Amino acid sequence: MIKAVIIEDESLVARELQSKISAVAGDVEVQALLPSLKTARRWFMQNAEPDLLFMDIQLGDGVSFELLEHFHLSCPIIFTTAYDEYAIRAFKVNGIDYLLKPIDEGELEKAISKCRALSEKSKPAPPDLQELLQMLAGSGSREPLYKEKFIVHIRHQWVPVNTDDIACFFKDAIHYLYTYKGNRYVLDFTTLEDIEELLDPRKFFRANRQSIVNIDAIETVTLHENQKLTLRLKKPLTLEIDISREKAPGFKRWFDR
C-alpha cells in the first residue's frame, strides 16, 4: 500500500482529489488532508514522510515549497496547481510532476504511475528549490510567524503572557495556560486546535486531546510497558501528561532532535 498525503487549503478540492485517487489507484491510501502550511509543518514534525505527496503551491499562509526546505523530503511529489504549464515547466525534474486544476482523472493516474515507478527504482532527487521559489514566491520563502504572546484575563484586566514563558496549554472544562512559574490563566479560545495553529511546532507538541506541551518544560519522559509515555513537567509545575502508544513514535521524533 502506498501512503499519501494531500496538502490543499480548499477542503472541497482536497476531498475531491482524495476521491479521484481512490478511483484511479486502489493501492494509494491517503493518510492525511492538511489545509495549511502550519498544519503541514506540524504533521511532518510528528510523522514519517509518506510514499507520495500531493501539494498545492500557494496556500493561505505561505508557499508549500517551504516544507521541502525545512524537512528535506525525498518522496515523489505531485503539485496540484492552477498555474499554467509555461509557469511550471521547471517542475518537470526527477521526482516531481504537476496536475492542473481541475484535475483530470486520466492525468492523475499517469502522474501516480510515474511516481510509483520512481519509488520502485530509487529515491528521487530533491528539486531545485531556489529556482522554484524565485519563480513563484518572488524573493523566496519567509519563516512563518507564530503567536508571540497570549492575552489572559485577570480581575477585569488584559494581561499579556509571552509564548516563550508558557509551559503548556491544558483543556479541562475551559482552556488554561500554565507558565514556567506555575501560574495558571484562563484563555478565551474555543478549542485546543485553534491554539495549536498559532504555535511553532518545533517548540510545542499536541500530546493528547487535553494538552499541548512546550519542549523546554519537559523534565522527564517515562516509558510504560504498553508503549505509552508520561511526561513530567519541570518544577514548580506538578503536571503529568500522558501520550498514547500511537502518538509516542511521533513524540520521540519531535523530542529527540
Image (cartoon, helix red, strand yellow):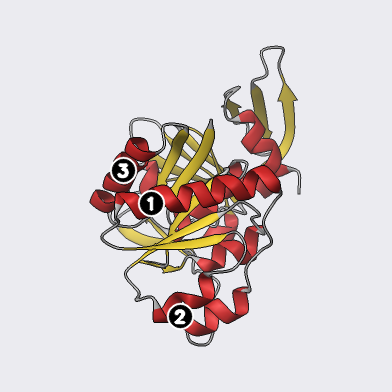
Identity of the residue drawn at 53% across and 36% down: 2
Mark yes or no: residue 188 visible.
no
Instruction: Provide the residue designation for mark 1.
Output: 108
In front: label 2 or label 3:
3
- Residue 217 x/y as whole percent: 66, 45
Q: Are marks 3 and 1 in contact (CB under 8 Å)?
A: yes
* Image label count: 3
Q: Which is more toward the observer, 22 or 107?
A: 107
Q: Amino acid at mark 2?
A: Leu
Between discs 2 and 3, the one toward the N terminus: 3
Instruction: Provide the residue designation for mark 3.
Output: 20
- Residue 111 x/y as whole percent: 46, 53
Q: Is residue 121 left or right of 117 when viewed as pictured?
A: right
Q: Which element type, helix, strand or loop, lies under badge 2?
A: helix
Separation of disc 3 and disc 1 at Cα?
Answer: 8 Å
Q: Residues within 10 Å of mark 2 (few under 14, many from 20)?
A: some
Instruction: Provide the residue designation for mark 2.
Output: 136
